[in-house]
Amino acid sequence: MSDRIHHRPMTPGDGFFADIVGGADPAQVREAGDLAATVLVRGARESDDPTLAERVVHLAETEGLETLAEVWSGAPADTLAGSLWRLFLLRSWVHADPERVAAEYDAGQRRVDVARVVAGVADPPGPDELRSMVDDVLRGIARGDFAVTLFRAAAFARIVAAGRASLDASHDEISRMLALSEQLEAAGHGEIADTLA
């Protein structure tokens, strides 16, 4: 037997909980993100305002990518919020580095012919053409078939992944782009696209 004296465990007092201030409840953040995504897409689709599609395309610029990340980045890929996050992230990346994207796309387009057709990028795929294509894909959020929007973005990401592979990019860079493609494609086949069709 031990000579150790056992004590009752300490219970946290009010001071313990006072230190946990300001943190948002993850469940509430996710619920707010899902609601915002639904309102954005359904509101844009039901509106007769022709400028609304352009405002949706530029949402990350006007609200800030960090704001969208805070609300949507933790959402699973097969949710509306998660799909929107991936679409806006893809657009922001294309606009931030269009020359690199054009080089990767050009290197991959001959390796993935079907994806090239689905993505719908003008030939030759220069920086301006890619920016135009990714903006057009995002316009599909407000008008058109949401599944087609997701499939076009997935095809584009698949071509870039193939281009990265042919340009000897790192395994992580190739894998991230391929995962993005697969996530967008799966979302296009999933329930969210069906509910918005």
Image (cartoon, helix red, strand yellow):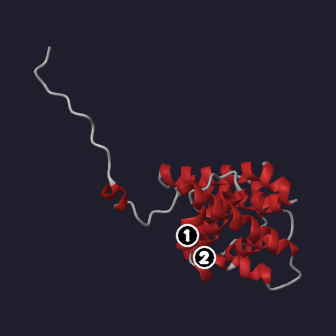
Residue 125 in percent (x, y) is at: 70, 71
Residue 91 in percent (x, y) is at: 64, 71
Closer to the chain start, of discs 2 and 1, is: 2
Q: Element type at marker 2?
A: helix
Residue 24 in percent (x, y) is at: 50, 62
Residue located at (65% from left, 52% from top):
77
Q: Which residue is mark 2?
A: 95
The quarter of the displayed image where residue 45 is located: bottom right
> At label 2, which amino acid type do we have?
His
Dot 1, how many residues are within 10 Å of its Cα: few (below 14), some (14-19), or many (20+)? Answer: some
Closer to the camera in the image, 101 or 194: 194
Q: Is residue 88 above or below residue 79?
A: below
Q: Nearer the viewer, mark 2 or mark 1?
A: 2
Residue located at (62% from left, 54% from top):
180
Q: Which mark is residue 100?
A: 1
Q: Is residue 131 above or below residue 150?
A: below
Closer to the camera in the image, 59 or 104: 59
Distance CA(mark 2)–CA(mark 1): 10 Å
Residue 3 in percent (x, y) is at: 10, 21
- Quadrant where the N terminus is found in the figure: top left
- Horizontal relation, residue 118 to residue 179: left or right: right
Closer to the camera in the image, 180 or 29: 29
The quarter of the displayed image where residue 27 is located: bottom right
- Quadrant where the C terminus is found in the figure: bottom right
- For residue 110, say whether it is visible: no
> At label 1, which amino acid type do we have?
Arg
Residue located at (78% from left, 68% from top):
41
Q: Residue furthest left?
A: 3
Residue located at (47% from left, 53% from top):
170
Q: Residue furthest top?
A: 1
